Amino acid sequence: MIFFASASANQNDLVEREVREAGATEFRTGSGGVEFEADLETAYRFAMWTRCATRLLLLVHQNTELESTDDLYEHSLTLPWENWLNPKMTFAVTENVTDCRWIRNSHFAALRLKDALVERIRMKYNGQRPDVDRDNPDIVFHLHVNRNLVSWYVDFGGRGMARRGYRAEQTTAVMGEFLAASLLYRSDWYKTLDTDRRTLLDPFCGSGTICIEAALLATDTAPGLIEPYRFAFVKLPIHKEELWQRIIAEAEDRQKEAGCRILGWDIDPKAVEIAKRNAKKAGVSSVIEFAVKDFTKTQSEDIETLGEGCVVTDPPYGVRLNEGRDITSKLYSQTGEVLYNIFGGWNACIICPDSQLLGYIDMKPDRTNLFVNGGLECQAAHYHIFSTEQRAELLKKAQLKREERLSQPLSSGAQMAANRLKKNMSSIGKEMAKNGVTCYRLYDADMPEYSAAIDVYEGKWISLQEYAAPASIDPEDAKRRLDELILATERVTGIDLDNIYVKRREIQKGANQYVKHGKPTESHFFIVNENGHRFSVNFQDYIDTGLFLDHRPVRKLIETMSNGKRFLNLFCYTASATVYAAAGGALSTVSVDSSTTYLDWAVKNMSINGFNTMNHFFYREDCLEFLRGNHDTYDLIFCDPPTFSNSKSRGTFDIQRDHEYLIRSCMKHLAFSGSMIFSTNYTRFRMNEDLGGDFIIEDITQSTIGEDFERNSKIHSCFIIRHRTKPAKQVFSVKTVRKITRKNNFPKEI
């Protein structure tokens, strides 16, 4: 017989291993699972032992020559369904259709198969027909269509394949048993299970699924033993009870003592009680130690008797439990701190659908695996947590390596770059220190041979942005010069090579200009200070760090102008300007950006500065759409648009072409006595002369260029724009008002 064992995304290799262990020798791993040849004994053994397969199907028939749903019906009518089904049985049909030109509706195809099944049984049993039962059928048939290949299957395993039967109760958010087992297989705990017998801890155990699956693995208990008659095949005509009893006895003989400790903690007493009852039903309650504990308050004495072990867990996250972003990010941050400070020498495996939340763990994973949990693509990050002794040894090795590197003489080119950096440190660096500025630009392509910008953050980190070399420059020469500049930067600033983050900044056009610098697999956020305010920056995952250093004087200006004002920040990015406005005493602030990522970042910046009150608003919306749909008035507006952007709703935006429309739109929302600060980084920007006739426009560019950017006075252009005269009040006739009311379906009262 030919079977198909379906697998969750990226878990085919685990199911293939289980197929081999069951005794199958002929198999093929493809999209969605593993197809294998087996007799009934091998199929029973696979069903008994599989931990990762989600479904086990038995092939009935295949055809590649059908061309319509009518063909599907006619061909299905010729198959011997009476070998599987009789009028006293109930049945259901499931389907999966991929890339088939003649099936537009997969449910309709399943309906045609159902009709053929019923008609075939009616013909064989003198008009009697079986009933459909979608909830609890005696037998399930599956239609699988992939392009022109049509396959008819009988569901051999049934729902029991993915549901062990021990989870009579569960918490709000649960992980599937097969996914928990797959996660354990990927973990470092399983890799050392037969040798080290290390402790396993799930500190967010919920209904206990990970702990129970770990106990089944540790005791070599087959999942099929929990409820051996839950499988669909026990109702099939081909079932052989004596053979199944032999497979059960074989599995029972393999059970053994666990040999390791398995612990499940949760802050919710109700969840712990549910986990205990589930473990009892699974027959492993004696193997697992459940307790009510707040993992974020773990102390060294809580684990001192456990030795070294492995944390495998699925912490709560906002999407799953509808929690606020601040709550979940704080939880992940605290989790990382506890792991780092308390669990030295342990390994950890943490699964989460949000790579930014994993970033709050603040450790670099050794490796990652991709899973799909409840329809969400998740990342399982694996960490080794170094002990105090290991950290000391690594630090010692790093220090020796650094000393050896610094003892080497610089090349002539690197020495030339170092000399220039020393000069800048003695001038720009001293001036910044004198003014209390800790984040500034040290170097900006001061020498044509070394074309890059070097920004210093807090004297701890360097963001080195290499400007792309012209096509005429040999790539090897460009790489050599970059390496020389990096070495010179470390030598002069004293900032370790590991804290020098290098990116290439290219001149881009069109839609590519503001594309994210790769999809972040792990976030690296640090807190920096500027004029008494704190900001979150990221040197690795995005093109920009989150804080435009050239706007430092602009932000200070906003702070001085904000007291008692209603402030609007358009294209707000990470809302650093909004922080200054709030600190300056703004009555209210509104921050608008089309990016969810940047708005989350903006909320974080406001939060770490203590601005969490209800008068600060954030809108994820295209700024031009916001201006068209919003009717509020503001006393101070900051508008720093991109040079180019595009949107599905409005097409492209070009700063030189469209700035007049943008500014006029903003001015409609500016109070008569208010001010608008307009800034752009487009180096060839020219303000439209027509705007000067309608508004008072003051070019304040030079006063907003800090000392560290004076060598590049075209880094941005900045203007203050005010109303020239008070706008006249619009008056509409009664006829016009009635027309507007009818068109917009307003109530008559309005």
Image: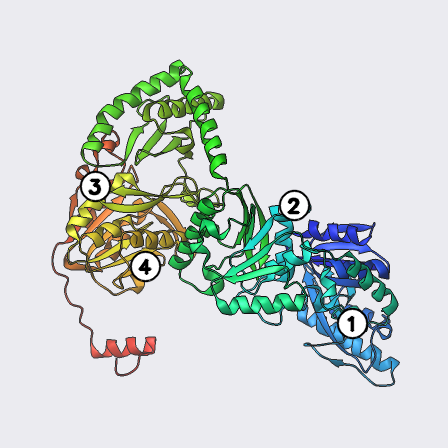
Q: CA distance from mark 2 to mark 4?
A: 47 Å
Observer-nearest residue: 225 or 511?
A: 225
Which numbered tag is attached to residue 618? 4
Observer-nearest residue: 178 or 658?
A: 178
Q: Viewer-nearest of labels 2 and 4?
A: 2
Determine the secondary structure under disc 4. strand
Q: CA distance from mark 3 to mark 2?
A: 56 Å
- Give the class, few, some or many, for how many residues have Cα within 10 Å of label 1's Cα (few <14, many ≥20): many
Residue annotated with mark 2: 191
Q: Amino acid at mark 4?
A: Phe
Asked if one can make out residue 172 in the rendered structure from this viewpoint, the answer is no
Reply above or below: 598 against 228: above
Residue annotated with mark 1: 73
* Nearer-N-terminus badge (3/2): 2
Determine the secondary structure under disc 2. helix
Residue annotated with mark 3: 553
Q: CA distance from mark 3 to mark 4?
A: 24 Å
